[in-house]
Each structure stands twice: as C-alpha cells, then as structure tokens.
Image (cartoon, helix red, strand yellow):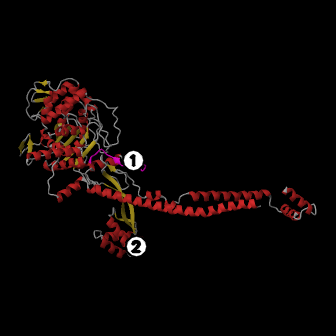
Amino acid sequence: MLRLNRKKLTILLIYASFFIAIPIIKNETRLIEKKIQNHKVQIILSEKNLSEAYLEFQYLSSPEILENKVSENIDTDYNNLSISQIYLNFHDFVDEQKKMTKILINEK
Amino acid sequence: MKNKKKKDFIHQNQKSFFFEDFLESSQIQRKINKSKISDDRLYFLFSIFFSLIVIFSISIFFISIKPSSFYDYKDINQSHLKLRRDIVDRNGDLIARNINSYHAAIKPNLIKNKDNFIIKIKLNFPEISSSELKKNLDKKKYFYFKKRLTDEEKNKLWSLGEKGIIIEPFQSRVYPHGQLFSHVLGQIDDDNYGISGVEKYFDKDLRNNKLSNPLFLTLDTSVQFLIKTELKKAMSDFKANAAGGLLMDVKSGQVLSLVSLPDYNVNIRNDISDLRYMNQITKGVYELGSVFKTFTLALALEENILSPETIIENIPNEVKCSKYPIRDIHEFPKKLSAEDILIRSSNIGSLMIGQKVGKEKLKNFLERLGLLKTINFELEEIGIPLSFNWEKCKLETVSFGHGITTTPLQAAAAYASLANGGYTVNPTLDLKKDLNTTNQKFIISKKTSDQINRILRKVVTDKEGTGSFADIFGYNVGGKTGTAKSYTNGNKNINTFISVFPTNQPKYVLLVILDDPKAAPHITYNYRGQLIKNISRNEAGWNSVYVAGKIIQKIGPILAINNNEAYNIHVVKKNN
C-alpha cells in the first residue's frame, strides 16, 4: 500500500513540477522571443536606415556632385596626375618623398 | 505467507457461497441485459471520443511547440523586400536601387466637408489647382492626388488627419548618378518591369528575389564621368550634334565606359522623340570611313600578300569606278609603303590593297570580325548594319570604309580583336559573365596583330600621321581616324577615332565619335610642341583625336593604378 502511494506520489510530484515548470519556461521563452524579435526589428530598421544613408552617400559622392561642390567652394584649379606621379603603395610614395627631401637639403 | 493468511481469513468469515454484492451486480447485469444499447454502440461512441481526444492532444502539442506567428520575422522582413535588385559598377559603387515611396490617393466618399478639405489642401499644396481638385471630388471616384511623394509632402498629408486621403506605398527605382548612365541603364515602368537598356535585358534576373547580391556591371563610374565631361565639352567646342565614347578591355571585351550624348535624367519620366537621344554607340549605324582601312591592311598582312614595308607603286590621284571618281583628300606621293598608306590614310592606296586581297576574302574577314551582322550585347537598343550586295565597285569602296555601315560598338570590338593578339572578343556589360577562353576564335595571327599595333602607333607618332593629338606621354597610344560623310540629313561629317593603348601590350580600346563637328578656331592646339590657333579644319584628326587625347590624359592615371603593367613600365623604372 505504501509502495503504491509512493509511486503515485512521485508521479504526482513530477506531474505537478512539470505543470508548474512548463508555463514558467514557456513564459520565459516568450519573453526571450519578444526580445529577439525586437532586436530583429531594430536590425531591419537599422538596415533600412543604413540603406538610405548609403544611397545618400552615393548621391552626394557621385563625381558630378563632388565636382560642383569643389568648384563652388574651392578656388584651386586641379590638374590631372601625370603617370610618373602614381604610387601603388604608401612606401613607394614615402621613399620618393625622402629622395626629394634629400635633394632639396643638399641643394641648400 | 501473508497472502495465504489473507485467503484463510476470507474463508473463515464467509457465511454463504455467494458474496454480499452478488445480488447488486446481478441486478446491474440484468439492467444492462434489459437495456436496448448494444456493446457495439458503446464501443463506437468510445472510439469517437477517444479519437477526438487524441486529435486535440496532438494539435495542442503542435500548437505549443510552434513559435508564435505574431512575432514571425519573415512577416516583418517581407515589407522590406525589394522588387528589383541593386545595380552596381565594377568597383561596387551603387548605380540603381529600389526605395519605398508613396502615392497619395483620395476617396471622395470619405470626405465629409469638401470645401474645408480643398482649403486645407490649397494651404499645404499651393501648386494644386482647386477647381481641378473640386471636379475630381465631385466625380466621387477614387483618384490619385499626387504621385511619388517626398517625405515632407507625405507628412503634410498625414497631418491633415483626413480619412479620405490614402497613402499608397510602392517601390520606385532611383539612380544616384542621375544621367551619367542613362543610355546604358534604361528605365522601368510603374510596375517595376524594365522597359529599356540594362533594366530590360536583365529584367528577369533583377526581379529574382532568391538572389540578394547586386548585379555587377563592367562600367567604372569615375571613368564614365571623365569621358562624359570631355565629350560634353567637345560637343560645345565643336558644335557637334551628338557625341559618343566607348572604352573597352581588349582581352575580355568588358565595357568600362559607354557614353552617348545628348543624354537624359533617368530619374525623370520624359517622352523623347528626338533622334539625337538614341544610343550613338550601340544603336547608331554609321559609315565609319577610314577606320576600315585597318581591316583591309590587316587581312593583306595576314594573307602574306604584303608586309608593312612593301612599296605600292604608281598610286594614281584619282580612280574611276564605274562612272564615279574616287580620290584622296590630299595629294600623296606616287609610291607609298603599305604602312604609310594607313598612316596617311590614303583612299586609293587602301583600294589597291583591297584589290590585291580580293572580294571574297575581304567579305569573309569582315564577317568574321562581326562587322556585318547584328551584335549580341546586353542592351535592347542595338543597331542592325545595313545589308548590301557585293556588286561592282563594292570591294573598292569597302576597302577604304565607304558603302559599308556598322555600329561604333562593333568597330571597337573589331579593333580589340586586331590588337589583343588576334582573337575575337564579345563586348559585355556583365562583370560576372564567364569569359570562356577555350572557344576563342583567332582571326589573325599574333605576328599580324603586333604589326598592326606598331602601325597604329605610327599613325599617332609619325609626322604624316593623322592622330598626333592623341600622343599622350606614357600611354603609347595608337589608333586610326575616320572622317565619313553622312548624306541623310544634309552634308555632314561623322568623325571617328579608334585608339588602342598601350600599343606595346594593348589593354584598352577607346572610341570617340562626333556627329557633324565644326571647326573650332578658338581652340589652341599643341601640335607636336607648337601652339597653333585659328584652325578651320574639321577632319577627325582635329576634333575626335583631340578629344580622345584629352580623355586618355584624364582616365590614364585611373586605369594605370589598376594596371600593374603600366605601373611597372612607367613608374618603377623612373623611381629606380
């Protein structure tokens, strides 16, 4: 009789604990889901804003707009770079400038 | 032991054979027997209820494990899905993108006080005609009040708080570079279907929602802008009707720039019927003149009929073909080498080379170069070369580029084939296109290609050459001029210059075409180090070549940065 009751009691306890735990877990999961969802919405909105900002950047940095802005705001007349002035990396540029500096110092 | 004791206890207390409840159970049994409900019915009912319980239990289980649809990410994401993919240039710079936009419509039935509504609208949108609005309201039919609203306009309408104003969301296509790529991109309709240009050619691909990456074009925004700026200036300097420019990679056929002027702003809808607004490079079919002389000479060299140094003797000043006289613009020496004929651009010299080559061979060669058929290119606006019969005098005129038409795109592709070592190239705008090198068809040998490149270089560097204004330091430019007459709309010139650079290892072909350019006496030309002004000549050498030189001077450094060969040749050596 006692053994049977214990069994029942154990089952009942397990059942009761599940009965209590499941809604708690479920509610917690829902809260986490909500948070995740809010983050996802935030990501989408940020992506949208980024997309608009990128579009604006592309428009404002388009060669025609830049040229107009330069001519409006800067008096300097720009010339094309000669091919001998092209450097593919920064070190080449620095080396060339050092050579130039040495020549200028020696001239002085 | 315990069980045995229990059994004994029952036996001792048993008063009769029957148990106490026997009577009751027999009564129940009797009731059941008497009742009209059969066992089968009970089992049937039980099975129904049991199945229902099982079904409900399963559905409850699935509902509990399924994530809530209210928070479905896909649903939210759906509203931001673009109907068309982005288009970007070869460097990833944005060329076209879909954005969310709005139309404002009005449901007249939902507006209670119409007079008040009209006043409100008039205050916020003074440009709207009150009478027109009143007329539309009286019709009591749903109508569009304003299309493509700006954010400010949308907010103004929201702030009116009228139920009858419906803000309809839709997607519109924006082109951040305005009219820079107008002739290449084309346009789309209100339903986001491509109706011209690349938008139409790649329509299915651009509307494919499964693809999220943008469509990469071979174009380069900076190069395109620089070429356009120079052509625009040229149109004003030489008072040309139209102008066109094309820059192509000689090996891959990738088009880095395609400019046709006049152009239009693709962000604004306009009906354009003026023929000048057609794509001069792909749709325009022209008799390009002397640029064809290169093809005649290339074939003669390939067939070993002559070498660049072979002297052609007794070149007359005039040749009569049928009853029509053919002559050169200037008087040339009676003896010219084959390469000199191209350098000086002699019509009669080319005619004599053409006669040596023969009609069939020249015809086949031009066909293999793809000059006589419609080209396969990623634009809808493609011109069809005019067909003709190879009758009397046709060989003679075709050998110097008269009586034969093609599009500038095809001519540039043919020059690329001659310059790249001799294999055909298909011009393309699609950067991701698989360039299958195994199916390359060689039309001339590497030796002939090198010979042609050397001669083209001489056209620019030689004293007698017609392309000296394109001799820009550092780029080894070579090329051929073409001045042709167009008789369709008056007697006007179509001036072309097709250049190849650097000629020692050709990388790019640049075509410049000007429609009816006039002499520009105000321009100070730097002619081989000498500054000259008040020039009244309007052949290609004085305008198209001059413009090509200016373009190469500007785009050269940009191309050189992407081209290690140019860097190694011109920069590293100088530093060392």
Question: What element does badge 1 sit on?
Answer: helix
Front in this rendered view, residue A21 or B454: A21
Image position, residue A72 (x, y; %) = 17, 59
Label 2 sits on what residue type? Ile
Q: Which residue is drawn at 14% across and 24% down?
A: B310
Q: Does A107 sit left or right of B104 as displayed?
A: left
Q: What's drawn in magenta, residue-wise?
A: B206-220
| Mark 1–mark 2 distance (CA, rounded to whole Å) | 42 Å
- Of badges 1 and 2, nearer the viewer stands 1
Q: Foreground residue, B14 or B522?
A: B14
Q: Three-letter amino acid code at disc 1?
A: Lys
- Specify whether residue B160 is painted magenta: no
Determine the image quadrant of residue B566. top left
Residue denoted by label 1: B204
At 82% from the left and 61% from the top, the residue drawn is B36
Residue that carries the numbered disc 2 in the rendered image: B111
Instruction: Name the foreground residue: B114 vs B453.
Output: B453
Provide the major secondary structure of the magenta segment.
loop
